[in-house]
Image (cartoon, helix red, strand yellow):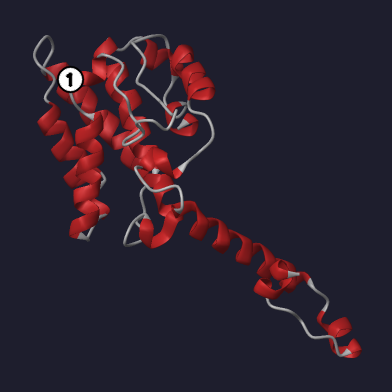
Amino acid sequence: MKRAWTYFPREEIDDKDPKVKSILFALCFFHSTMIERRRFGPKGWNMMYPFSIGDLRDSYLVLNKYMESNQGAKVPFEDLIYIFGEIMYGGHIVDDWDRRLCNAYLCQTMNEALFDELELFPFIEGKNLSFKVPIACPFDRYLEHIETSLGAETPLAYGLHPNTEIGFRTNQCNQLFNNLLELTPKDDAAETGADIKSPIEIAAD
């Protein structure tokens, strides 16, 4: 989220209309969600989609064009949701369920409540978690809000069950032990006749 927000020049954002700032903040959160959800494998997306900072950049350019041509008028959220969800990010998506999920995230973040401290975390009632879109403020205040309010990463931020992280951490652990095994001197193991244990056996020990 911090990387996405700081991608844009401070001076440029500070000069923008307050509504553009709020929409961009929500768009950065949406981008971060699309990127980070990939770590959960099939529980995140059905495929490893190549979402990138280029998608965020192009979405921001489209946002600027729309807001410049609709000055003083109602924000065209339906158009923005379609462009972001079907063209910019949706252009990578080939699975129908993944497309529905992408649009669900957009519908959650791109609406009129955005200008009144919209809650960005879905399904967190009673979980003592919260991350809201702040009232329009200078660039550095948004950055401070990200650093102080976002807290530790949790699957709940994506609308996933907390146990979703178990699979990710298990794969992360296996990868770590596999890398350690790759660094083990092969000649020494062969000379001593030692059996090289699997990552699961090492973890059990």
Residue 161 shows in this picture: yes
Which amino acid, by three-letter code, is at mark 1?
Answer: Glu
Residue 203 placed where, x, y %?
Answer: 70, 67
What residue appears at the point 63 percent right and 61 percent down from the top-left corner? Answer: 173
Left or right of 203? Residue 105 is: left
Residue 148 placed where, x, y %?
Answer: 53, 21
Quadrant assignment for the C terminus: bottom right
Residue 122 placed where, x, y %?
Answer: 31, 35
What residue appears at the point 21 percent right and 29 percent down from the top-left corner? Answer: 110
Quadrant assignment for the N terminus: top left
Mark 1: secondary structure: helix
Q: Quadrant of residue 31?
A: top left
Q: Quadrant of residue 4?
A: top left
Q: Eyeballing the image, is 15 above or below 176?
A: above
Residue 14 placed where, x, y %?
Answer: 38, 11
What residue appears at the point 56 percent right and 62 percent down from the top-left corner? Answer: 170
Which residue is identified by label 1? Answer: 112
Q: Eyeballing the image, is 24 above or below 87?
A: above
